[in-house]
Image: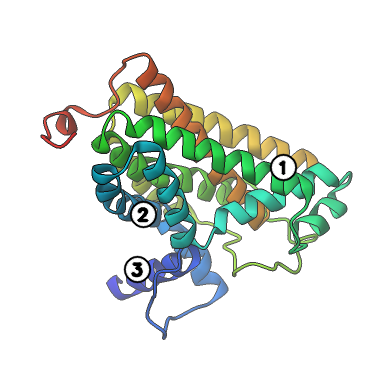
Amino acid sequence: MIKREINLFWLALAFFTRIPVPAELDFSSEKMNHASRWYAAIGALIGFLLAAFLYPLWFFLPENIAAIILTGASLLLTGAFHEDGFADMCDGFGGGFDPEKKIVIMKDSRLGTFGGAGLFMELTLEWALLAYVLERGWLSAAALLISLHALSRGISGALIFFMPYQAALDLKSKSKPLATGMRKSDLLILVITALIPGWLLLDPVLMTALCVTGGVMMLWFRSFLMRHIGGFTGDCLGALQILALITGLIIAAVFLKGDLPVLSAIMEINPIS
C-alpha cells in the first residue's frame, strides 16, 4: 500500500515538475489516473521550494526584482507546464470557431498571437502581484505560494472528476501522458491535500474567499468547456490552474490593500516577517 502510494506520488511529481524521480517507476494509464490524487500535494511542494528560494532574494534584493526572478524559477521548476497549456488554450479558443478547430490549434506546438498575448499578460500580472505581496514581507508571500500552488492544482485536478475527457478530439497530445479519469477516493485525497496548507497558513476569512471563488471558477470553467468542446483536455487543465493561481493572488492583494489579515493566527506569531 505504502509502496503503491509512493509510486503514485513519484508519477505526479514527474508529471508536474522537472525534479528528478526514480528511473524505474511502475507506469500505466490507470496508475496515472490514480496519481491525480497527489496533484495538490505536489503543488504544495512546489510552493514550498519556491518560498525557500524566495527568502534570500527577498532579503538581498528589491521586491520587484525578487518577484521576477521567482517567476522565472517557477517556470524552470515546472518546465512551464501549465503556462504552455494556458497559452495553447488562448490560441485555440481565440482562433478556433468550432470544437475540432479549437483542438487542432491547441495541439499545434507553435505559439500564436492569442497565446503570446495571453502568456505575456499572465506572467506580467503574476510578477506584479508577487511583488506587491512581497512588500508585506516574506512570510505572507511564502504562505500564499504554498497555499495557492496546492489549491490551484486541486481545483484543476478536480475537474477531471466532474467532466469527461475530450478523447474523440484530443487523440494526439503533444504533452506528457494525462490523467483522464478519477475515482471518488482520488478526489477525496486531492481535496484534502489542496485545503490543508491554506487552512493552516492563511487567515480563515481569506481561505474561505479563496475556496468559494475557486469552486465557482471550476463550475464556470466546466460549463464553458462543455459548451465549446464537450470536455476537457490537458491544455484546459493547465489553463485552469493558471487562472486559479492568478485569481488567488488577486484576492490576496485585495485583502492586503484593505489591511485585512492574510496569515493565520499561528503564522502571525512567527518572528520572521
Residue sitting nearer the eye, 111 or 248: 111
Query: Which kind of residue does numbered mark 2 sit on?
Result: Ala
**Residue 23 coordinates in the image, percent (x, y):** 41, 84
Q: Identify the residue at image location x=70%, y=67%.
A: 173
Question: Local crowd at mark 2 within 10 Å, few (<14), some, or many (≥20)?
Answer: many
Residue sitting nearer the eye, 125 or 23: 125
Residue 265 can be seen, yes or no:
yes
Going by the image, does 162 lie left or right of 207? Answer: right
Q: Earlier in the sequence, mark 2 or mark 1?
A: 2
Residue 230 can be seen, yes or no:
no
Determine which quarter of the picture holds residue 105: bottom right
Going by the image, does 249 lie left or right of 217? Answer: left
Where disc 2 sits, the SS reads: helix
Question: Local crowd at mark 1 within 10 Å, few (<14), some, or many (≥20)?
Answer: some
Mark seen at residue 81: none
Query: Which kind of residue does numbered mark 3 sit on?
Result: Glu
Question: Local crowd at mark 3 within 10 Å, few (<14), some, or many (≥20)?
Answer: some
Query: Which kind of residue does numbered mark 1 sit on?
Result: Leu
Q: Identify the residue at image location x=39%, y=57%.
A: 42
Alpha carbon distance from label 2 to label 3? 12 Å
The residue indicated by pointer 3 is 5
The residue indicated by pointer 2 is 41
- Choose mark 1 or mark 3, whichever is in front: 1
Alpha carbon distance from label 2 to label 1? 26 Å
Residue sitting nearer the eye, 84 or 138: 138
